[in-house]
Amino acid sequence: MAARAIGLKTLRQHQLQLQRWFSSGAPEKTEGPLAGTRVLDLTRVLAGPYCTMLLGDLGADVIKVEHPTRGDDTRAWGPPFKAYARAPQAKKKTPDNPLYTAPPQFPGESAYYLCVNRNKRSVAVDLKKAAGREIVAALAREADVVVENFVPGRLAAMGLGYAELSRINPRLVYASISGYGATGPYSRRPGYDVIIEAEAGLMHITGDEHGAPVKVGVAVTDIATGLYAHGAIMAALLARVRTGRGQHLDLSLMQTQTALLANIASNYLVGGHEAQRWGTRHPSIAPYEVFATADGRVCIGAGNDAQFASLCRRIGRADMAARPEFRTNAARVANRRALAAAIAAVLREKPTADVLALLDGAAFPFAPVNTIAQTFAHPQLRARRVVRQIHHPFVGPIRLVGPAVHYSCSDVAIRRPPPMLGQHTDAVLRGVLGYSDAQVAHAVRSGATALYDYDIQCSD
């Protein structure tokens, strides 16, 4: 009852704050929505780091635990690497201060690692050492959230599963990300994005109609799982306001990808329809696909009869809208090959710029098929400041894709560059766990952690 009373009181305080905001006009930007929330990040590669990056963008203090010599797997995934403007060199290690060592050498900072690890602090901990596991348990005691992506059962065997950590911190929200989930016959199998794309139907429906199955160009299953985890953690933190307790969140690439099948899944479950590959076409709408131009490609979608008639007028084929075989969407779908051929015959004679000029201002959606370079030169992305630049202490300025959501009242920003391996170990051991000099020395000498001398100021 006491926890419930505290939760209701906190909820009421939030409600009163909102009332004050709305009665006094738009508030000034405040700190991030998750400021004061601590996240212990035990994840590697993409799905987990993407989730914890989003939490860090929202203001959470994210402490990333990495192996002392290898670090996150993606530190070695390249090229491309951002070359070091100055090499990390040990300067603090002396006979009187033997704990600091030179950090492991990498070719540079990998672009893959940089893309999902901003707004985090890195500590170097070896979970195979008892003292390393003690450090992680102590950090979990001080955390609001733990995110991990070990094979189910691995952390529990180390005494770091949800059951063990929730006993020392009942308010802990513990998110587990795995290939197949914590239960079921495949639960102990490892899972990578491309494997799940194949196994959970996405690859079957991706690619040319008469070609082989292909993977999506970006690891969409990993990223979507990270998004699901981020949303689930936020919901669990809100639930904790009411109950005073955390909970375990069991996420998997397999279930995420199955959920992403959306209408394709419903077509099968409701109508028994097996899906097929359509390339850029849509099974139920025509025209809805990519067309070649004289020097590139454009994508056009006309979702209703009025939009189709508008398209026909703009490309100089108003007669097509009146033909019985194209008059309705159902007729266009039934005759999609003839329809596509007629549109393609007009567009392939014109440069992309001319096609876009013909369609400019139309009520139906259309766009060029842009390269990545053209994407980042897009005036809309520039106007929205999608690309952000931040200074990295060793590689200099780096450009990153910023947060995807603009907040009117909260400061959501890139506050920290992606950390060097173990950059914050000493600061976290002392500042978060209150370790003494003797405790830090024991942790280093036992092999549980490492202090890397980067010769940079790092007080937090």
Image (tube, rainbow, N blue to C red):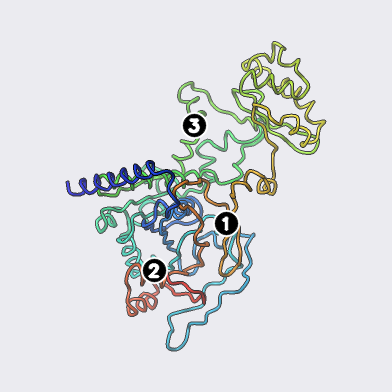
Query: Residue beneath label 1, please?
Result: 112
Q: CA distance from mark 3 to mark 2?
A: 43 Å
The quarter holding residue 22 reads top left
Image side of residue 449 versus residue 243, left or right: right
Compared with 139, 274 (above or below) is: above
Mark 2 crowd level (few <14, some 14–19, many ≥20, 10 Å Cα): some
Choose between 202 and 311: the one closer to the eye: 311
Mark 1 crowd level (few <14, some 14–19, many ≥20, 10 Å Cα): some
Choose between 321 and 264: the one closer to the eye: 321
Q: Position of residue 93 (x, y in %)?
A: 48, 83
Choose between 59 and 244: the one closer to the eye: 59
Compared with 380, 41 (above or below) is: below
Query: Residue beneath label 3, please?
Result: 262
Query: Residue beneath label 2, please?
Result: 428
Q: Position of residue 443 (x, y in %)?
A: 36, 74
Q: What's the residue type where badge 3 is placed?
A: Ala
In the rendered image, the residue lying farthest to the front is: 24
Q: CA distance from mark 2 to mark 1?
A: 25 Å
Of callouts 3 and 2, the N-terminal one: 3
Q: Quadrant of the C terminus?
A: bottom left
In the rendered image, the residue lying farthest to the left is: 1
